[in-house]
Amino acid sequence: MRRRELWYSAVVRDRYGKVISRERRRSHSFLKQWNQLVACQMVPWEGFGFPNIKATDGTYWPVGIGTHGYNFRMNGYANADDFGIVIGTGSTPVTVSDYALENQIRQGTGPGQMDHLVCTVAASVVSDPDCDFLISRSFANNSGGSITVRESGIYVWMERCVSPFTSYARACVVRDVFSTPQVVPDGGGITVNYTLRVTE
């Protein structure tokens, strides 16, 4: 029987690049927005019963298959904290109805902020019996103090299926709370990886 699995890892380094802590676990934290967006790719919703999917700001968006192919886009730009892998300080347990991180760490160098590097999405790799693809992002702490990261997730683009068609919202499709809070020292950084796997 084939299974769909999601794994995450978090690796913290000090200002000299030395690994000071790490965690790797199987994620059980696909959120309802994930399956809602999958469904949008299977049915031409435009014109009848398109779903309204809850965005990260709490509003509901009429989402369809899209004309630009932006649904599920997660390759966040450098300094962009609204899509791709994101991190936060919240510790409330995950529920399938979560629609955002509890307390997201924003882009910047001020207190409690981190620099967001590019979020990369690698090509899928087949190694029988698995087929994996890796999503990865690093964050640099230049805030002047340590920051404790307790949660991570993935924000993706959603494309409207009604006018204005050029507008986009963000959906949280994955959220995890770390079993061990990861303390990132000033001058250090954290790298979060998600591996999506289909396996026999």
Image (cartoon, grey):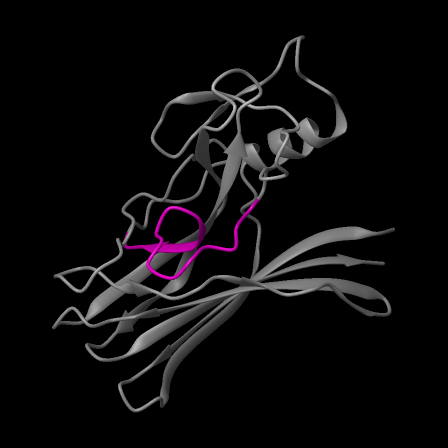
Query: Is 126 left or right of 191, judged from the image as shown?
Result: right
Position of residue 51 measured from the top left corner of the image (x, y, whole percent): 58, 18
Position of residue 92 measured from the top left corner of the image (x, y, whole percent): 33, 44
Q: Is residue 8 magenta?
A: no
Position of residue 176 measured from the top left corner of the image (x, y, whole percent): 45, 52
Question: In this view, which residue lies farthest toward the top?
Answer: 48
Q: Is residue 5 above or below residue 100?
A: below
Position of residue 165 measured from the top left corner of the image (x, y, whole percent): 52, 23
Residue 176 seen in the current view: no
Q: Is residue 88 magenta?
A: yes
Residue 18 seen in the current view: yes
Q: For the point 27% across and 71% down, which residue is it?
A: 183
Screen quadrant of the C terminus: bottom right
Query: Is 130 left or right of 161, judged from the image as shown?
Result: right
Q: For the point 75% across and 23% down, which residue is it?
A: 43
Instruction: Give 26 or 164, whichever is nearer the viewer.
Output: 164
In which quarter of the view is residue 179 placed?
A: bottom left
Q: For the point 39% across and 45% down, which residue is it?
A: 93
What secondary structure prevails in the magenta region?
loop
Query: Is 178 left or right of 199, judged from the image as shown?
Result: left
Q: Is residue 13 above or below residue 27?
A: below
Q: For the point 68% across and 62% down, which residue is it?
A: 133
Q: Is residue 49 above or below residue 64?
A: above
Q: Is residue 55 above or below residue 73?
A: above
How many badges with numbers are in the image? 0
Q: What span is in magenta? A: 73-89
